[in-house]
Amino acid sequence: MNVSIVGATGYGGLELIRLLKNHPNMKIASLHTSSKFDRKISENHTHLLHEDFVLEEVNPEKIADKSDIVFLATPSGVSAELVSAFSQVNVKVIDLSGDLRLKTPGEYEKWYKKTAAPQKIIDSAVYGLSEWNAQQIKEANIIANPGCYPTATLLGLAPLFIEGLATEDVIIDAKSGVSGAGKSPSEMTHFSDMNENFKIYKVHEHQHIPEIEQQLSTWSQNMQPITFTTHLVPMTRGIMATMYVKVNKRISTQELYDLYQTSYNSHPFVRIQRSGQFPVTKQVYGSNFCDIGMAYDERTGKVTIVSVIDNLVKGAAGQAIQNANIMMGLDETAGLSTIPIYP
Amino acid sequence: MNVSIVGATGYGGLELIRLLKNHPNMKIASLHTSSKFDRKISENHTHLLHEDFVLEEVNPEKIADKSDIVFLATPSGVSAELVSAFSQVNVKVIDLSGDLRLKTPGEYEKWYKKTAAPQKIIDSAVYGLSEWNAQQIKEANIIANPGCYPTATLLGLAPLFIEGLATEDVIIDAKSGVSGAGKSPSEMTHFSDMNENFKIYKVHEHQHIPEIEQQLSTWSQNMQPITFTTHLVPMTRGIMATMYVKVNKRISTQELYDLYQTSYNSHPFVRIQRSGQFPVTKQVYGSNFCDIGMAYDERTGKVTIVSVIDNLVKGAAGQAIQNANIMMGLDETAGLSTIPIYP
Amino acid sequence: MNVSIVGATGYGGLELIRLLKNHPNMKIASLHTSSKFDRKISENHTHLLHEDFVLEEVNPEKIADKSDIVFLATPSGVSAELVSAFSQVNVKVIDLSGDLRLKTPGEYEKWYKKTAAPQKIIDSAVYGLSEWNAQQIKEANIIANPGCYPTATLLGLAPLFIEGLATEDVIIDAKSGVSGAGKSPSEMTHFSDMNENFKIYKVHEHQHIPEIEQQLSTWSQNMQPITFTTHLVPMTRGIMATMYVKVNKRISTQELYDLYQTSYNSHPFVRIQRSGQFPVTKQVYGSNFCDIGMAYDERTGKVTIVSVIDNLVKGAAGQAIQNANIMMGLDETAGLSTIPIYP
Amino acid sequence: MNVSIVGATGYGGLELIRLLKNHPNMKIASLHTSSKFDRKISENHTHLLHEDFVLEEVNPEKIADKSDIVFLATPSGVSAELVSAFSQVNVKVIDLSGDLRLKTPGEYEKWYKKTAAPQKIIDSAVYGLSEWNAQQIKEANIIANPGCYPTATLLGLAPLFIEGLATEDVIIDAKSGVSGAGKSPSEMTHFSDMNENFKIYKVHEHQHIPEIEQQLSTWSQNMQPITFTTHLVPMTRGIMATMYVKVNKRISTQELYDLYQTSYNSHPFVRIQRSGQFPVTKQVYGSNFCDIGMAYDERTGKVTIVSVIDNLVKGAAGQAIQNANIMMGLDETAGLSTIPIYP
């Protein structure tokens, strides 16, 4: 099976290359960028020394000729245009940007401040939250790959919402490594400014808010607006979402564990922590795992859920490959069953 | 004015030495430890090369002879014993541990799992939240210096509680640099484990919970139990408390700012951020500032408050000196008016 | 092919587990520790959640019954004893400690301050510098796996020494990530002390000095004592050796490149940098690569060689597996052909 | 005494502001930038909240009217032009850039690839290595403030060179925190690229090479070209120079210590380490100290010298203030006698 990557030199694209290198059923047919093509990718990305990929221009027809799947690891705004072109040719599309995730163009334009993709394209895209939408993913031609924060958050909240235990007063305090801010240098991500620093950003304004709410509302009709804040941690990879949920009934921590164990029993990439333990971001470093811990607080009647992922793997390239596996009828874990890097 | 420091080689003690070095009215008379005394502190603490302090045994009478104030930078459990001895001699005491903060010994024993100090001692100790308890501090002989998390949290919540705007459903998601975990090496603070890692710890069990609630309840009789979680950030210094508060009435972000500006107008160490900006931990690095930003979220009706301090300065040694200044009738900022280290 | 790991919970052992997970020809038969056995390794090592390995006591006979190879990821001093026991049973041994590397027991005892292994054992051990000793490794039953610093250094110096270009005045300034100091917490590796810090240690006294000199002297009879210093970098993984060599004749940078390209042409894990570029440690993160850059300095007549590895992979577990592959007649790269993690 | 700072928003300028805040004899009269003036500096530099400085345009005459000294914290190339203008008006100039350090314009143009300042200006500038050029500094009107690497290196080598113990084969392996690369974001200093990474850069080409050689040659006529390499450490502040020197006679480590103790006896900012200890960068964090350790290696006949500074203090703003103190006849330590930040 052949695959192509558009946007190969961003962090998402580079991570796809790394993971696909050892995929037993997929082979990278071509790498594409919108500029600086016709050179070897290893010239500016020395971790790829000895890899012979040459960067090519984006030509949907040529890509469709040689590949079964194209991964769009392009920024929001760019994907919307590309996916229209790719929908004309015979290739399955997995889009890692936010362009196809929101079903209502007006919502997209409000939160992203960009022009939305055509409604027809949006309608045909399936939201690729692998653990919960596998049936639709199997039949899809276009996947809107979830955002990093929504992945950590939704996997953490799903059992509570599906079970009808939570509807309102959900607070999500999310923290991310700096690679989530992308590869372009900026003041915010300058080493001397970011090191020994902890930052909060986009308070009440993050574009992942409507994405999370959209999915939560498919699980629970009475879903209320969520409070969601995002922080940058002086580290490269990793997301932790600490979630505070008011539940509608008393529930023991053990019952919580049983619920989560049952919910994720057949899902190899979601690991429920031992009772009394909470996950740290490093325990999923470089892997496609999402690890979850939780506890009911007798004093407040609230549940605290903690979910961690590697933002570039389960939060981007890893889940994209997982979705590709599901789409193509392969084992869901193909190419992804590695042990996290520790320490 | 002469001062002594007990527990001089812990992080709190070392920070007191650093800050007192340039205090215009206070002079370090002696440094004390419970072990390894009779040697120069610079032997094992090379940043103090050229400083001639010799570590001495703890002898309350001798300390009282030469000093006006003694700072106890000793661990919880140790301070309780020491302060009883110091209360017999003529010296003012500022205790940086948690031993004298909780007014109910039972609460102390429940959260600290240690024997509480005698009720009489506890009763005579004033909680040294400088900005809000200055009147009592002026007349005190024993100060219970606030914890690092409570300082950031209480300064951030005070105006809302005092104004009666908030009573319930307060969630505090707190993050700390690793120096907050102290100087003793441990698995949790081993560099290779902590670097590139973000950890949550003591979920629902942190001993600062009752300290925060005790102070909040002096401001608001209907105070409900808080949800409070703590995280370790891979950096050395700094605390950010992100606080989510349901307010009892609609309030604009501008009204919030006005309230906070007014509340802290006469308090030089609390700096209210420009509207629309939120503080980062690095902007107070090495200083005694507490910087606060906030916003009202129209979608959820909740207020998000963000407060940052340097855990070793405003969260420990700096506030201790601020309290000493207030006690001794000095300018509150004496020795503390430095610019944060940046970058 | 079955393998066992003794010392499975140290950094070397954990890295062997990670790498062997995806080895096409080797399967972990058992994991062993000297204490805390009979429990699942995932209990204290949460990145291994979902892995079912139970830690077992060290019993050489039982290990030999089920495994073809045993990896000793045990500390210096411990390996010396174990390897004697394993030499009595039918299993190939790869020792990651320093115990079998030095051919002269007196040298071992001088630098390690411990009792050396029996001469007979030492004599039967082959120094496993994979790229240069493959012939001997193929026929060995016991491998002394090289140290992390010696691996980076020797791969960097080999062409110059073998070609007879360098004999004296070699200065090696080596820098390592903190995982090189092992997993036991200590003051030196405490996060708050090590973060934002750069340290030099064991000046003129590092036990890797005789290991490097021993191998250099097999390449060049006139080898003079080297100057070798080691530093700790506030990062977890990675070694850079910056080497300064006085060459006996004028040589252009291009000639240097040709020499190195030729020397390592058939060695897939040594990558020679493009001319004018020097490697950074991150470009080999998590991989078995050793990347090398170099330049001749017209002003001084010296050559600067820069070599980087991941200390836990090419500097420990990765090279151990490479050696196992060579010993067992497998493809040298089996289980090791991954792309480094970036960023 | 009034001072002005040109280039106030770079790292050098910001550090001058921080240090001058507590200077007993100097007061900041005005801050200047080449763009974005007429706004409060605290708008974009939130650590300066509550400081009321407004950024002003650069006007040499107006500056001379109100200030006794002007600090040029401007980039190389810019200072050369400015200093000509300031030499026309009545104000003392301390230039933190590299523009006035090299006495031969051709050397400047070769290493900096920029047009040199007029020879007359260069001739009138005194190289401000405070500990060794105090006499000239006292009488100077223009100071060329030394570079960060040269400061660490020259203070470390001075006693050996002045004593005639070293002339050739000097190798300097220097490592710097990332703030040394300045405040402008770039790929090299992007957090996700620099974190968990150790880099070598400008091999054999760093513009500080001629600066170091120029000063060494004033101490020793037979000085030979030095080998000098620079590395970036994933930390914000701090420089370590590890220096390898072939000495012309056998010398014990104790004799070395005596020599250095004597040389720096009357210099409060140079601290000689205890014998057997070597400094780490963190022990001078935020301070004007230069700490030095050393050892003679019996095996190789070479001396290893290790010198650490904070690159923004002793390597820039701190030494600039030290020079200003000397120029103005103040106590050399005025405003600079602080204890380093630890941890």
Image (tube, coloured by chain):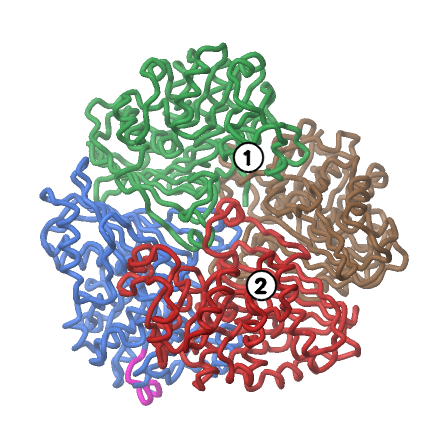
Chain colours: A red, B brown, C blue, D green
Q: In front here: A145 or B90? A: A145
x then y, percent, for residue B237: 59, 48
Q: Is residue C131 above or below residue B179?
A: below
Residues tagged 1 and 2 counted as in contact (Cβ below 8 A): no
| Real-space CA distance between mark 1 and mark 2, rounded to the nearest whole angstrom | 56 Å
- Which amino acid does the dot numbered 2 rest on? Ala
Q: Residue at x 65, y 64 (%)?
A: A107
Q: Is residue C69 magenta?
A: yes
Element under label 1?
loop
- Which amino acid does the dot numbered 1 rest on? Ile
Q: Which residue is mark 2?
A: A116
Res C282 seen here: yes
x then y, percent, for residue B322: 73, 37
Q: In front here: C259 or A24? A: A24
Q: Is residue D114 above or below residue A2?
A: above
In the picture as drawn, the residue positioned furthest to the right comes out as B221
- Left or right placement of residue B236 versus residue D241 in this view: right
x then y, percent, for residue B99: 75, 54
Q: Which residues are magenta?
A: C62-70
Mark 1 or 2: the one toward you: 2
What is the count of numbered marks? 2
Quarter of the figure with residue B226: bottom right
Return the mark for residue A285: none
Return the mark for residue D339: 1
Q: Is residue A36 above or below residue A261?
A: above
Element under label 2?
loop
Quarter of the figure with residue C127: bottom left
Q: Is residue D204 magenta?
A: no
Q: Residue at x 67, y 77 (%)?
A: A218
Q: In front here: A331 or B172? A: A331
